[in-house]
Amino acid sequence: MSVLVLRHEPFEHLGYFTAILDERSIGYEYRDLDSPLDVAALDRATGLIVMGGPMSANDPLAGLAAEIRVINAAIERGTPVLGICLGAQLIAKAMGASVYRNPSTEIGWGAVHLTEVGRADPIFGGLADPSVFFHWHGETFDLPVGAEWLAYSDLCRHQAFRFGSNVYGIQFHPEITPAMIEDWCAQPVNCGDVRGLDSLPDPRAVDSMPLARHIFERWLEFR
């Protein structure tokens, strides 16, 4: 049994999470956006991770529609689900919430604050409040009905939520490594995002591996 990972671009991969899976001898399988996908992909999955990507959750892409069906099926089956950035937006959309432009584009390192519920959450509890994470997004989402609001930043109100006990949406990027940040800044599809920045983010400004480990190891306990 392994974790099913829905990936939208090769450069938006598991990052720090890969080493944690390897340490625990947990297998994982990537399914890319242009790969065939249906709910049968969940049959051998003990968890579902939905990664980020430069597209919008509202784009009329057949691959995104298939992912939303798989997300809904995973939630109905009780399979643990973790969405990162676009992945969190897709979970919200699958559950009937709206996804739309955030008032500000948020790119670079920034503080994430926990709500009262977040400070007591099984995953987020124990993190320093605030903690600094990497951000790269221009859209946000409403909280799905029944979801618990866990975290926020100065530029984006909904940075994390939990639905039930094992479905999490995270707008920021705990998984990202310094090499990934450098790669993302060089990707042609991201040129429009970085063109307006005063300077590119420093990939090594924060050692976020301990934060990635805190979040991901706790989520893996749900499998």
Image (cartoon, grey):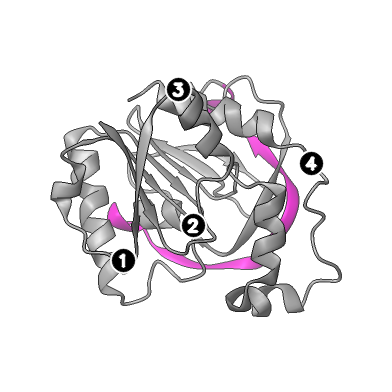
Distance between mark 4 and mark 1 Cα atoms: 32 Å
What residue sits right under mark 3 in the picture?
Answer: 24
94 falls in the magenta region: yes
Give the residue displayed 32% in from the left and 31% down from the top.
164
Q: Is residue 210 left or right of residue 34?
A: right
Which residue in the structure is indicated by mark 4? 206
Q: Residue at x 42, y 26 (%)?
A: 220
- Tag 3 and tag 4, C-beta contact below 8 Å: no
Query: Label 1 vs label 2: CA separation?
Result: 12 Å
In the figure, is residue 73 to the left or right of 90?
A: left
Q: Is residue 206 visible?
A: yes
Mark 2 or mark 3: name the one nearer the start of the chain: 3
Within 10 Å of disc 2 (Cα), the crowding (few <14, some 14-19, many 20+) is many
Of the image marks 1 and 2, the number of the one nearer the N terminus: 2
Q: Secondary structure at mark 2?
A: loop
* Secondary structure of residue under mark 1: helix
Q: Residue at x 62, y 78 (%)?
A: 188
Residue 63: image quadrant is bottom left
Q: Are marks 4 and 1 in contact (CB under 8 Å)?
A: no
CA separation, marks 3 and 1? 30 Å
What's the amino acid at mark 1?
Leu
Q: Nearer the viewer, residue 114 or 186?
A: 186
Dot 3 crowding, Cα within 10 Å, few <14, some 14–19, many 20+ = few
Q: Which residue is mark 2?
A: 52
Which circle's residue, 3 or 4, is located before the other in the chain? 3
Q: Quadrant of the N terminus?
A: top left
Residue 181 in percent (x, y) is at 69, 56
Q: Residue at x 25, y 73 (%)?
A: 62
Q: Magenta stretch?
A: 92-119
Is 53 displayed left or right of 206 in the figure? left
Residue 138 versus residue 81: which sits nearer the camera? 81
